Amino acid sequence: MIVAVAGEKGGCGKTSFAVHLSGWRVCAGRDVMLVDADRQGSASLWVESRLQQELPAPSTVRQFDRGLRRAIRDLSRRYDDVVVDIGSGDGAAIEAVMRVSQCVVVPVQPNGMDVWTIDLLDELASEALDLNDNLRAFSVINRASTHHANRDVIAAQEALRKFQEVEHSEVVIHERSSIRRAVPAGLLVNEYRPVDTKGIAELQAVFQLVFGDTPPSTTHSCGG
């Protein structure tokens, strides 16, 4: 399966999604390639950190520009799953990857500026569907406030439901220190201590949205 994580704005949390989708698939016994198509290289650094800690990790490759779509197609023949972390605002890469992906996940922070960027992604998804009728594209609210009185999520959900091709998933990921700290440490959120059951459950919902099942491990490292 080819899965991409894309966003027009930086800071939306796409690398956190990409490493958890790929990492948990490895835990499920799948042969996974994580394509780092973001020039910041955060996904590659996460894999490098895991290997240094002798933790299970997907294979990884950095790929940009014109060769991206062809590379993904080739990798999909050699790996069970290919997960692509696309650079923020890289419209050409998003368009290319949408044409070969089965699923595109779009993390969106619950504010007007981020929600507005879905217009372009919705247009790109519409064009991609003319060539790739297997494509499913979902928006997922990420980094939502945990304050009970905050209404940003409700407003964002109402706006996101209006898009035609990027379907709003209703999945909400809140701002969690466990997620924010786990990824730079080369960990999955279930490996972070102290255990954050809410953070685990929320990212688990993204995994289930994409793959239709739950990760094999939610309380400990898949390596032990």
Image: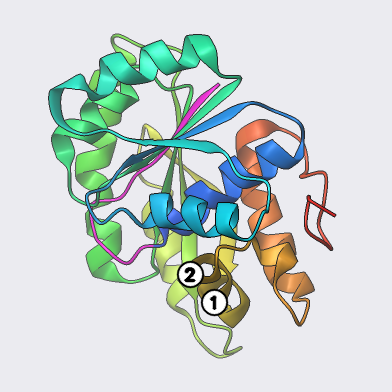
69 vs 145: above or below: above
* Residue at horizontal 63 percent and vertical 26 percent from the top: 31
* Quadrant position of residue 5: top left
Residue occupying the point 69% across, 28% down: 30
Tell me, for residue 72, which label it has, or none: none
Q: Position of residue 203 (x, y in %)?
A: 64, 57
Q: Amino acid at mark 1?
A: Arg
- Screen quadrant of the C terminus: bottom right
**Above or below — where is 160 with respect to 184?**
above
86 lies left or right of 186? left
* Residues shaded magenta: 1-12
* Magenta residue check for 121: no
Which residue is under mark 2? 184
- Residue 152 position within the rendered picture, expressed as x and y whole percent measured from the top left: 43, 76
Category of crowding for the residue at label 2, using alpha-carbon neighbours closer than 10 angstroms: few (below 14), some (14–19), many (at least 20):
some
Query: Image height check: is 158 above or below 3?
Result: below
Residue at mark 1: 181
Q: Is residue 107 visible?
A: no
Residues at marks 1 and 2, CA–CA distance in whole angstroms = 6 Å
The reply, left or right, for residue 142 in relation to residue 88 is: right
Looking at the rendered structure, the kind of residue marked 2 is Pro
Q: Are marks 1 and 2 in contact (CB under 8 Å)?
A: yes
Residue at x 52%, y 60% (from the top left corner): 49
Q: Assign the N terminus to one quadrant of the image.
A: top right
Q: Nearer the viewer, residue 21 or 41?
A: 41
